[in-house]
Image (cartoon, grey):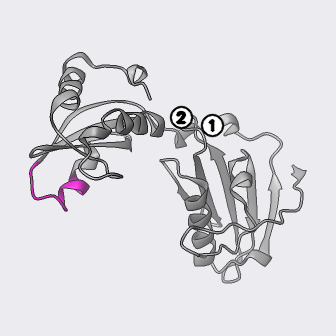
Amino acid sequence: MDVAPTLSSAFTAEDGFESTLPLAPSVLLAHGWTGLSRPSRTSGLILVETWPSANDSGFIHYSCVAMPGGLETYSKRAFAPKWVGMAIDLILKSHGSTAGELTWTRMRHSPRHDGAAGKHVTQEFVYFVTAGAFVKIGKTTGQPGSRIAGLQTGCPYPMTLAAHEPGGIKEEFALHRRFAAQRVRADGEWFHNEGPLRAYVQALAVKKIPAGTVNP
């Protein structure tokens, strides 16, 4: 392992929560960073690692392994650095760790180099869920239909997975911009299921339009 340079900048989240970890977003985005922590309430170690998403530029995955026992927590989906910083910080705090107990190193050979994360990399999809006269454009990891159960809880209309296509954050945002005129709210994921968007979803369901045809 190479010895890591001193990390001077602290990570601060949007809501004013200041992390106890000496991590800046630019550091989190660098692949292969790991942290060994000696938790105060256990005799084991925690290995923390971050790596960039293979699909979404600027987004990252994280993994925390508590030893002994091998208890592992990892993100199946990629997050913005600000949220990963908070997640890692809370995980370490739950094991009694503080920033003063962390020693950061950089791995010379990371198995997740350039986003190759093995079992942590799963297929991402952009999904179109209809509910009444509306359609939601969102992104999920794994089976697109798995999102419906969670979404249905807060929706008064029966929800149906109308279509889906391979894609991540970029494709999702491109579709949001493309059909912005049909948005229910200025910054939401719900759209009026009509006109060009309705035609797109219907064509996708029949022809399996690839994500690459979506233009920003």
Q: Which mark is residue 55?
A: 2
* Name of the residue lying farthest toward the bottom: 41
Q: Residues within 10 Å of mark 2 (few under 14, many from 20)?
A: some
Q: Residues within 10 Å of mark 1 (few under 14, many from 20)?
A: many
Residue 39, given in percent of the width and then of the height, sits at 70, 77
Image quarter of the C terminus: top left
Residue 184, given in percent of the width and then of the height, sits at 23, 49
Identify the magenta region.
149-158
Location of residue 125 by image quarter:
top left
Residue 81, given in percent of the width and then of the height, sits at 61, 55
Using residue 146 as the reference point, say whether residue 172 is left or right of it. Answer: right
Q: Is residue 118 visible?
A: yes
Q: Tag 1: residue type?
A: Gly
User: Looking at the image, which residue is at 42% across and 39% down?
Assistant: 173
User: Looking at the image, which residue is at 28% across and 48% down?
Assistant: 147
Question: Residue tagged by mark 1?
Answer: 115
Magenta stretch: dominant secondary structure:
loop
User: Looking at the image, which residue is at 48% across and 48% down?
Assistant: 76
Using residue 20 as the reference point, say whether residue 108 is left or right of it. Answer: right
Location of residue 34 by image quarter:
bottom right
User: Looking at the image, which residue is at 63% across and 37% down?
Assistant: 115
| Contact, mark 2 vs mark 1 (Cβ under 8 Å) | yes
Q: Height in image: 20 above or below 141?
A: below
Determine the CA span between mark 2 and mark 1. Answer: 8 Å
Q: Of callouts 2 and 1, which one flags the residue occurring earlier in the amino acid sequence?
A: 2
* Name of the residue lying farthest toward the top: 207
Q: Is residue 118 magenta?
A: no
